[in-house]
Amino acid sequence: MRVIYSEDHKLRDARTELHAGQLVTPFEAPFRAEWILAAVKEVGFTDVVAPDAHGLETALEVHDPAYLDFLATVWDRWVAAGFTGEAIANSFAVRRTSQRVPNNIVGAIGHYANAADTSITKGSYEAAIASMRCAITGADWLNAGNRFAFALCRPPGHHAGIDLFGGYCFINNSGVAAQRLLDHGARKVAVLDVDFHHGNGTQDLFYHRGDVFTASLHGDPMHAFPYFLGHADEEGEGEGEGSNRNYPMLPGTPWDVWSSALADALTRIKTFGAEAIVVALGVDTFERDPISFFSLTSDDFTRMGAMISAAGLPVLACMEGGYGVPEIGLNVANVLKGLKGLE
Ligand code: OKS
Ligand code: ZN
């Protein structure tokens, strides 16, 4: 199991998150990656490497070039406007409004945001690039013929759409990794999103494409972030018809219900003909996660890894969510152990 990790995640260290009507210390903070890295090393996953210095080539195949340019420049534009706080969107391009990108930075950030929770700071872009590089380097480990890799991505990526940031995500790491696998010979791949939250960004990237099967198991959007996508009737369109599958589930969902959805997703991934699985690996399905409502236990994460492994395909896990509690490290380590058939 190769682990890919960059110290540059620390460049993303926001002070503010708009949460419950207040600016709080973000849930998505540097300690997460440190705890996870320590825990996976602790159980013997010590093959930890830094990512290769990839540019934007692969990201440009799944994201809008103007969006990536916005990400690269937003902080400097925010500062140039004279603002002293972190960059937060507060005005949005919603129903029946123009989709022109405003010149004004407040308008531009609102155009490209799908939520106001995610403050942009100095260094956020550089951290997002490092995170993307971890995912690409992990994909290349599979491209070289290896069966497993774990990209310890931070910031996460699965809420980042073609031209949207939010939900702590800027560049869709799992999506970029899937594209990288396709660019290096795979004909079809799958992104399996086991994070508590719907992978709305990943769904957006591939909704009209027939070469990537996207499946997401998540809190029902009627009750949980990201609220506006993730329903069971979203199945893909055009070339992508039938290649998106959502499994919305209710508060308190335990392993037996959750794992039935996983089994169905894995069957469909095999039927689709995927040659590899990118797992958008959030561990915020844990029973004590501070912002989620499923009931998985630490042992369930080992079972999860074993089930995914049993599909018999190469697997790249890219880190997504999981917050607050010390068990995030153990839970990730357990998924990796399950993948490898340990314990
Ligand atoms: C509101 C909380 C917003 C939830 C963002 C979800 C992030 C996540 N302040 N996505 O997988 O874990
Ligand atoms: Zn999540």
Image (tube, grey):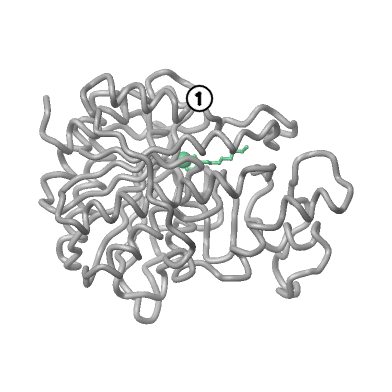
In this picture, residue 326 sits left or right of residue 71 = left
- Above or below: residue 155 compared with residue 182: above
The residue positioned 49% from the left and 63% from the top of the image is 56
Which secondary structure lies at badge 1? helix
Which image quarter: residue 265?
Answer: bottom left
Image coordinates of residue 161 in percent, x first then y, are 52, 61
The residue positioned 14% from the left and 36% from the top of the image is 340
In this picture, residue 145 sits left or right of residue 25 = left
Q: Badge 1, how many Cα within 10 Å: few under 14, some, many 20+?
A: some
Image coordinates of residue 266 in percent, x first then y, are 20, 53
Number of disc labels = 1
The residue positioned 46% from the left and 64% from the top of the image is 59
Image coordinates of residue 77 in percent, x first then y, are 78, 56
Q: Nearer the viewer, residue 204 or 234?
A: 204
Which image quarter: residue 145?
Answer: bottom left
Image coordinates of residue 29 in percent, x first then y, are 55, 30
Outermost residue on the bottom side: it is 238
Q: In which quarter of the image is ligand 1?
A: top right
In this picture, residue 52 sits left or right of residue 3 = right
Q: Name the residue under label 1.
A: 31
Which image quarter: residue 4?
Answer: top left
Q: Quadrant of the C terminus?
A: top left
Q: Which amino acid does the dot numbered 1 rest on?
A: Phe
Q: Quadrant of the N terminus?
A: top left
- Above or below: residue 193 compared with residue 252: below
In this picture, residue 152 sits left or right of residue 100 = left
Outermost residue on the front side: it is 53
The residue positioned 54% from the left and 44% from the top of the image is 127
The response on whether ligand 1 sits within 8 Å of label 1 is no
